Amino acid sequence: MVSFIFPMIYQNFKQMKKQLRKPSGITMLLTGVIFLFSSTGLGAQTICSNDQGSQGGYTYEYWKDNGTGCMTLGTGGTFSVEWSNIGNLLARKGLRPGGSNVVINYGANYQPSGNSYLCVYGWTTSPLVEYYIVESWGSWRPPGATSKGTVTTDGGTYEIYETTRTQQPSIEGTQTFQQYWSVRTSKRTSGTITCANHFAAWARLGMNLGNFYEVSFCVEGYQSSGTADVYSMSMSTDGSGGDTGGDTGGGTSDQGDGEYTLTVRARGMAGGEHLNVLIDNQAQAGINLSTSWQEYEVYVDRGDLNLEFDNDGGDRDVQVDWIEIHGETRQAEDMEYNTAVYQDGSCGGSYSEMMHCGGVIGFGDITYQGDSGSGDNTIIVRARGTAGGENLRVTVGGNEVANYTLNTSFTNQTIYTSATGGINVEFTNDGGDRDVQVDYIEVNGAIWQAEDQSTNTGVWQDGSCGGSYSEWMHCGGYIGFNSLRSASAANKESMEQEKQETNVSIYPNPVVNLLNISVAAEEDGPFETVIYSTNGTAVKQFLTQPGINPVSLGDLPNGIYFLLINVDNQTFNLKFLK
């Protein structure tokens, strides 16, 4: 009798748990179900003391330091946990050792009160790293650090962080180790997590993992209380994880290591279909399709893009919805070149999402506008790294126009763009010995020195990240340059600035001891004047008047300095050498 009614009871069990707020009838039925489970030996295992083992095809671990809490193991990857006034608690199920290509489908009823995470959790060794992919959280969004970048995958955007734990407990005892984080920008409690996309994004920022110890789905509580019912959780290492009802499950990709992020939305008709991602007819990545729609993220170089269906046979066919590159979406049905569609009695045609035969859909050139030589404005960035491998991202008006890697010698990167707005040169992968020195940028023939810019969030000054008037970026951050409008507007602005600066001058330059500051006599003083060193420290501050103002610099060491003076609501920045 028990074996006959068990499938029916379990099928409705999760739904009934969601309806606990409803009165008497449902509650009494659920009570009867629980009684039936316990009285027949089919009850789930509940753990209230630190323990680990295997159950339901997954490893599990329950750990807490103090407070009250229990973990209940369900079928397969499911589990639930409740905790009250806990110090720190982790309840998790997963795979040990797991690996880089784990795909997770999950659903949870997550109700934290205080600080808590719903996440993918694990460790690697050599190097020792503790890592998190955080899907939702309680009262505090972790980890309280500066973002190193982002990764967009599985229908959302995650911010990436790196933190250090000094002499703290680990799987290798008390150690100092790094923590890697991907934290979703908006909370969710169900969906698909493609771990490989996060691990690849971390690696591009110099955050390298070692040998996997585990990949687990985890509920963590810290100085808090709460409940969580992970009513659905499955893991696969080949993209065949269970579907949670969305349209992103299944499928895997060999992501490649190119400089551009390409997203492909596609599905197979039978499952197991394979796409090659070709750049200039050379394979740079591969995608294994499932039968559900999924967005696959791969990394490719500049050039002509074709998607190739290379294992046609049986019932296998492919449907490609779109590709996205540099924020631009290109629909497959808008592409003229499709040798894989079956049209008019043969393979080959155009303007179709379908690939029935072995062949390709051509999506055209995907080179950045900044790399392609097109656009009304020319920007040249002269910079170098101290270690090599530093990454610079150049934006105009918030739009990315270049993203490239530095070596240890000064090089010029030429960018052509029609974008307008403020120019930022951003250092995106700080870590280790990596630092960046920006000499200048040249905009439509006008040179803007990095050390003349008042906004530099990447320089280390006065004991913290952020300052001004420096070529250096020691931290993740950016140097903000003037606004780019158009070639003609920029040239006009440059000429106007030169004309304005004739109202203020300094001499001699270089100076030995006495610097003369000349301000046009028609201006109304006094004028606030500050002299800065190259590290952004104000070394002298005083008022000047119209006419010649001698200033003694005998107490300053030899070096490069910047004089800032406000005249008629305009700030002039003049560089001199002592």
Image (spheres, rainbow, N blue to C red):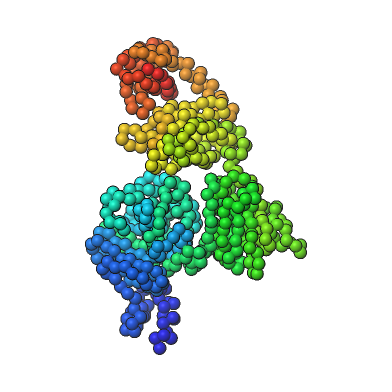
Check the image and name the residue furthest to the right. 344
Query: Residue at 47% across / 56% down in the picture?
Result: 196
Q: Is residue 278 left or right of residue 541?
A: right
The x, y position of residue 228, in whole percent, is 35, 65
Count numbered badges in the picture: 0
Please tell me whether residue 333 is drawn above or below residue 410 in the rendered image: below
Residue situated in front as seen by the camera: 142 or 544: 142
Please tell me whether residue 490 is drawn above or below residue 300 in the rendered image: above
In which quarter of the view is residue 359 placed? bottom right
Please tell me whether residue 150 is drawn above or below residue 189 in the rendered image: above
The x, y position of residue 305, in whole percent, is 63, 50
The x, y position of residue 508, in whole percent, is 41, 12
In which quarter of the view is residue 84 placed? bottom left
Query: Residue at 35% across / 50% down in the picture?
Result: 178
Residue situated in front as seen by the camera: 524 or 162: 162
Please tell me whether residue 464 is drawn above or below residue 297 in the rendered image: above
Residue situated in front as seen by the camera: 504 or 54: 54
Check the image and name the residue furthest to the bottom. 1
Check the image and name the residue furthest to the left. 66
The x, y position of residue 496, in whole percent, is 52, 21
Residue situated in front as seen by the camera: 456 or 53: 53
Quarter in which the N terminus is drawn: bottom left
> Is residue 201 shown to the viewer in this render?
yes
Query: Residue at 43% across / 13% down in the picture?
Result: 520
Query: Residue at 33% across / 16% down in the picture?
Result: 553
> Is residue 333 shown to the viewer in this render?
no
In which quarter of the view is residue 273 placed? bottom right
